[in-house]
Image (spheres, rainbow, N blue to C red):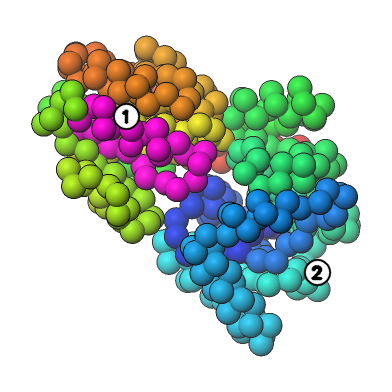
Amino acid sequence: MKINFFLPGIPKNPVGGYKVVYQYANALSENGHEVCIIHVDNIKAPDYGEKSNKKKLLKRLTVRKLLNKICLIKKRIYLEKGNVINKDIVSWFTFDKKIRFINQWDFNLEELSSADVNIATAWNTAILVDRIPDEYGEKFYFIQGYENWQDSKVVDKTFNLGFHKIVVASWLQKMLEERFKEKASLLPNFVDFNDYYLMNRIENRDNNTVAMLYHESETKGTEYGLEAIKIIRERNPDIKVILFGVYNRPNNLPQYIEYHKKPNIDYLRDYIYNKSSIFISPSILEGWGLTITEAMACGASVVVSDSKGINDFIENGVNGLVVEPKNARAIADKVDELLNDNDKRIRLAKQGNKVISNFTLDRSMKLLEKILEQ
């Protein structure tokens, strides 16, 4: 098959949703399919008649977003001069050499070859794919989450576009059917077990080490995770806390917290996941929960907020502990429970590691091919 993946602009930092698409692109290419990845920076949403709240938009224009805007302007000038951004600019991912790349500021249909399949991977790329003539191939919409941090009215409109829809989790499938009367194929996410695996025996771990992803998106619930860690530390002064993320170390982070900026896969696996006895995820909403599954694959027991996506691979009390979202004390209480009951921590971690071993790239890849061929 000839397969086109459509993504927004190239990210300079690792992004889970992009990585999943890139991994599928690699696997499809290695299986003999012709794959093209199209990145488009400037995708304008159609006007649905809703007026923007200018005060709200100005409030959200942080210094970081302003700097990102400057970078986009520079990239636009670079692309409009006819320069080509090489695939190596995605420094954090290695692509199969046979994959073709198109990188644009404004979408230009003339550069696009017809294909058997065109796959939108986000709400704005769904808008773009909708504009492509039908003779260019079948249209699919790969949905990894409910992107309601954007303009939810525009996002909702994309769910009713006439595409074949693929979702990564049961809750997304249910949402599309109940709210939008749309059917979707379920394609569970996976763990790359070449990257994430058990190295440090679960029963031999220091039971006082807790890890968490630091993320500035509100949906990740970091503020509740940090508050939970504060409570845990007050109860257990000897606890070791490890945080990691793509950002510089936050200025207000207590000195007792160890922080790693952009750890590579080897370091993340060997010195964070495999050294941790407990992994915390305070997310409010997740399409799936990639870092949680990575931690489980590396043998950490998990304490997570019920962010919806986790329900496809965590059963409360069986292979992890689940609490209601936005409840720092509940997270702290469950972590405390495992700190004081090593046998329970070991049992949950072993069962979690066993369950997550079923979520392989090979399994998901075969299912994706089947969906695309139907």
Locate residue 188, reporting x and y percent: 56, 32
In this picture, is 256 found above or below 282? below
Circle 1 sits on which residue? Answer: 228
Residues in magenta? 208-233
Looking at the picture, tell me which residue is in the foreground, 329 or 80.
329
Looking at the picture, tell me which residue is in the foreground, 78 or 238.
238
Q: CA distance from mark 2 to mark 1?
A: 50 Å
Q: Are marks 2 and 1 in contact (CB under 8 Å)?
A: no
Residue at left offset 25%, top offset 50%: 259
In this picture, is 69 found above or below 197? below
Locate residue 157, reporting x and y percent: 81, 42
Residue at left offset 30%, top offset 23%: 332
For marks 2 and 1 on the same chain, the one whose residue lies earlier in the sequence? 2
Circle 1 residues within 10 Å: few <14, some 14–19, many ≥20: many
Looking at the picture, tell me which residue is in the foreground, 288 or 372.
288
Residue at left offset 18%, top offset 47%: 255
- Secondary structure at badge 1 equals helix
In the shown orientation, is residue 247 left or right of residue 337?
right
Q: Would you say residue 212 sits in the magenta stretch? A: yes
In this picture, is 152 found above or below 301? below
Residue type pointed to by label 1: Ala
Circle 2 sits on which residue? Answer: 109
Q: How many marks?
A: 2
Locate residue 110, reporting x and y percent: 81, 73
In the shown orientation, is residue 110 left or right of residue 303?
right
Q: Would you say residue 325 sits in the magenta stretch? A: no
Locate residue 151, reporting x and y percent: 71, 46
Residue type pointed to by label 2: Leu
